[in-house]
C-alpha cells in the first residue's frame, strides 16, 4: 500500500499514570511535507471517528492498550492529535503525561522513532564540575535501565523509572525510559538504545537534564526527581532490583475509511 495514499492516517496515544511533579506544556512536531487535510475530507472524518472511539476502548482494557479499525483502504487512521498542528498530515505532540500523534504513513510498523515525529528537549542548565563523570554516570544509569527493561518479558507496560547516586552537589541522577507495549522487549531495547546513542549529537554533555521523545519510545534524565511514585530501579544496587509497576496507558488504532 502506498505510504501517502489519500486519506491514509496512522495515529497512537500514550498516557502516563506516573504523573510529573510539575505542570507540562506540549511540544509539537508538525510536518506538512506530505500535504494537509481538510475537515470534510476522508482523512479528517477518520480522525474524528478514532478520537471518539479510543478513550472508551482503552479505559475498558485490562492492559490499558486498545486498537480500533473501521472502513476500507486507503483511508486508514490510527488515532491521535490534530489540535496543535491544524490540517498537517504528520503530527506528534508530547506532554509530560502523554504523547499523541498521527501520520499518513504507518509508523506503528516501525520499531524505532521517526525523525520527523521526535523532539529533543533539554533543561538549559549545566553542571560546572565533574562533567566527564556526570556524563559517564548518566550513561550508566540509562544503559542499566534499558538493559533491565529489555528483560521485562511479562510486563505489558514497558515503563521504568530509575536513579543513581552521584555527588554532594547532585546526590542523585534520575531517569525514565518507556516504550509502547506493542513492542517486544528486544524491540523496546533497540529503540531506547538508538535514542540514547543520539544524545551526544543532540545535547551538551554537561546539561543537567534532557529527553528524546518519539512515538515509539522515550528516554529522559534529570538531576531532580521529575516523576511521582517510587523509583523503580535504584543504582548502585545492594542486591536484586526491586521493580514496582507504576503503569502507563497506551492507545493506538487503525481506521479504514
Image (cartoon, rainbow, N blue to C red):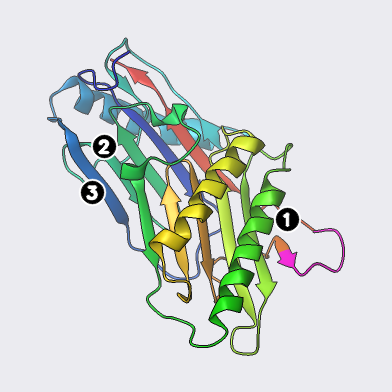
> Closer to the camera: disc 3 or disc 2?
2
The answer to whether the residues at label 1 and label 3 have Cβ atoms under 8 Å apart is no
Segment colored magenta: 234-241
Number of other residues with Cα within 10 Å of mark 2, as a class: few under 14, some 14 to 19, many 20 or more: many
Q: Is residue 128 left or right of residue 116?
A: right
- Residue 71: quadrant of the picture: top left
The answer to whether the residues at label 3 and label 2 have Cβ atoms under 8 Å apart is no
Q: Nearer the viewer, residue 30 or 248?
A: 30
Secondary structure under badge 1?
loop
Q: Earlier in the sequence, mark 1 or mark 2?
A: 2
Query: Circle 1 is placed at which residue position?
Result: 244
Number of other residues with Cα within 10 Å of mark 3, as a class: few under 14, some 14 to 19, many 20 or more: some
Secondary structure under badge 3?
loop
Q: Residue at x 73, y 55 (%)?
A: 244
- Which quadrant is home to the C terminus? top left
Q: Nearer the viewer, residue 240 or 17?
A: 240
Query: Circle 2 is placed at which residue position?
Result: 90
Q: Residue at x 49, y 83 (%)?
A: 127
Query: Circle 3 is placed at which residue position?
Result: 84
Q: Position of residue 27 (x, y in %)?
A: 31, 56
In magenta segment, residue 237 = yes
How far apart marks 3 and 2 lie (CA) works out to: 11 Å
Q: Is residue 210 left or right of residue 119?
A: right
Amino acid at each position: 500500500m502506498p505510504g501517502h495514499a489519500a486519506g491514509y492516517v496512522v495515529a497512537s496515544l500514550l498516557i502516563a499514570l506516573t504523573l510529573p511533579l510539575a505542570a507540562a506544556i506540549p511540544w509539537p512536531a508538525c510536518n506538512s511535507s506530505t500535504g494537509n487535510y481538510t475537515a470534510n475530507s476522508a482523512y479528517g472524518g477518520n480522525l474524528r471517528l478514532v478520537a471518539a472511539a479510543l478513550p472508551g476502548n482503552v479505559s475498558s482494557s485490562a492492559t490499558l492498550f486498545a486498537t480500533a479499525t473501521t472502513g476500507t483502504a486507503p483511508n486508514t487512521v490510527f488515532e491521535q492529535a490534530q489540535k496543535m498542528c491544524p490540517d498537517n498530515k504528520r503530527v506528534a505532540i508530547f506532554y509530560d503525561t502523554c504523547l499523541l500523534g498521527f501520520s499518513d504513513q504507518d509508523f506503528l510498523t516501525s520499531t524505532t522513532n521517526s525523525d520527523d515525529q521526535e523532539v529533543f528537549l533539554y533543561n538549559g542548565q549545566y553542571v560546572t564540575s565533574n562533567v566527564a563523570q556526570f556524563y559517564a554516570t548518566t550513561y550508566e544509569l540509562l544503559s542499566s535501565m534499558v538493559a533491565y527493561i529489555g528483560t521485562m518479558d511479562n510486563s505489558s507496560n514497558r515503563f521504568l523509572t530509575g536513579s543513581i547516586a552521584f555527588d554532594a552537589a547532585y546526590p542523585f541522577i534520575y531517569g525514565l525510559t518507556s516504550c509502547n507495549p506493542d513492542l517486544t522487549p528486544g524491540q523496546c531495547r533497540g529503540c531506547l538504545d538508538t535514542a540514547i546513542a543520539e544524545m551526544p549529537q543532540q545535547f551538551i554533555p554537561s546539561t543537567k537534564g534532557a529527553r528524546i521523545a518519539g512515538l515509539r519510545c522515550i528516554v529522559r534524565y534529570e538531576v531532580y526527581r521529575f516523576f511521582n511514585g517510587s523509583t523503580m530501579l535504584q543504582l548502585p544496587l545492594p542486591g536484586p532490583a526491586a521493580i514496582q509497576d507504576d503503569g502507563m496507558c497506551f492507545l493506538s488504532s487503525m481506521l479504514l475509511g
